[in-house]
Image: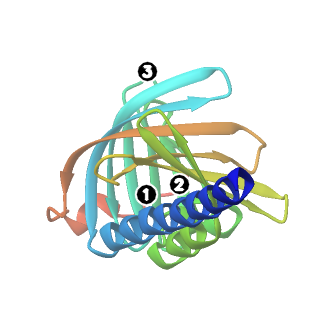
Amino acid sequence: MTYKRLYFFLIFFIFFLNNTLAEDKDNIIKNLENLKTLKFSFLQITNENSDVGVCFLEFPGKLKCNYKDNKQKELLVNDKSLYITQKRYNKTLYYPLSKSPYSKILNKKELIKIIKKSKIEYLNDQIRLIDNKDNKQEITIFFDKNDLILKGWKIEDHFKNKITFLIDIISINENISPDKFKKPTLN
């Protein structure tokens, strides 16, 4: 009789856990579907180095980050391109976005696909959704466990740098000037 109860309890627990995991993913997707823009401060950790700054994100596919560093670095994602500008040196580097994980993170449809198929983990106050596409390039997206708001991501760039990008939301769905995402002149 005890084995039957234990078996019933395990089946119930697994069923309940699977429903909770699916419910969290569904609620995260609902939040994303209503999200148009974000302004946030960030902490970026690349290998052993860290940077801070402020970013503006507009779905689909636009991101501008101003770094608080001595190079006056800016990162701009726009029109399927990624630009990194160092204003101090008047230097801009260009990369095709298709080779970057940002092509998935900044495209709401692609991000939702990642969420649906990813493995979910709970760690402290975060929900982590891990997508390991064919063991090629792992993308982990972080969400706040309580309000299910985007909290950052962990990726590997095309130079094999491991980048953790943690965000703290300043504003949601406020208008962002189109000039904010204007392409830089290439040097």
Task: Identify residue type, mark 2.
Answer: Tyr
Q: Which residue is mark 3?
A: 70
Q: Nearer the viewer, residue 100 or 104?
A: 104
Report how far apart the C-alphas of labels 2 and 3 lie in the structure.
18 Å
The mark closer to the camera, 2 or 1, is: 2
Q: Which residue occupies 67% across, 53% down?
A: 6
Q: Secondary structure at mark 1?
A: loop
Report the residue that reaches farthest toward the left. 174
Task: Identify residue type, mark 3.
Answer: Asn
Q: Nearer the viewer, residue 17 or 43?
A: 17
Residue 81 spot, x, y in % from top left: 56, 66
Q: Which mark is residue 52?
A: none
Report the residue that reaches farthest toward the right. 135
Q: Which residue occupies 70% across, 48% down?
A: 157
Report the residue that reaches farthest toward the bottom. 109
Report how far apart the C-alphas of labels 2 and 1 lie in the structure.
8 Å
Q: Secondary structure at mark 2?
A: strand
Q: Which residue occupies 72% across, 53% down?
A: 138
Q: Which residue is mark 1?
A: 184
Residue 112 spot, x, y in % from top left: 50, 73
Among numbered discs 2 and 1, the one appearing first in the sequence: 2
Q: Which residue is mark 2?
A: 83
Among numbered discs 3 and 1, the one appearing first in the sequence: 3
Q: Residues within 10 Å of mark 2 (few under 14, many from 20)?
A: many
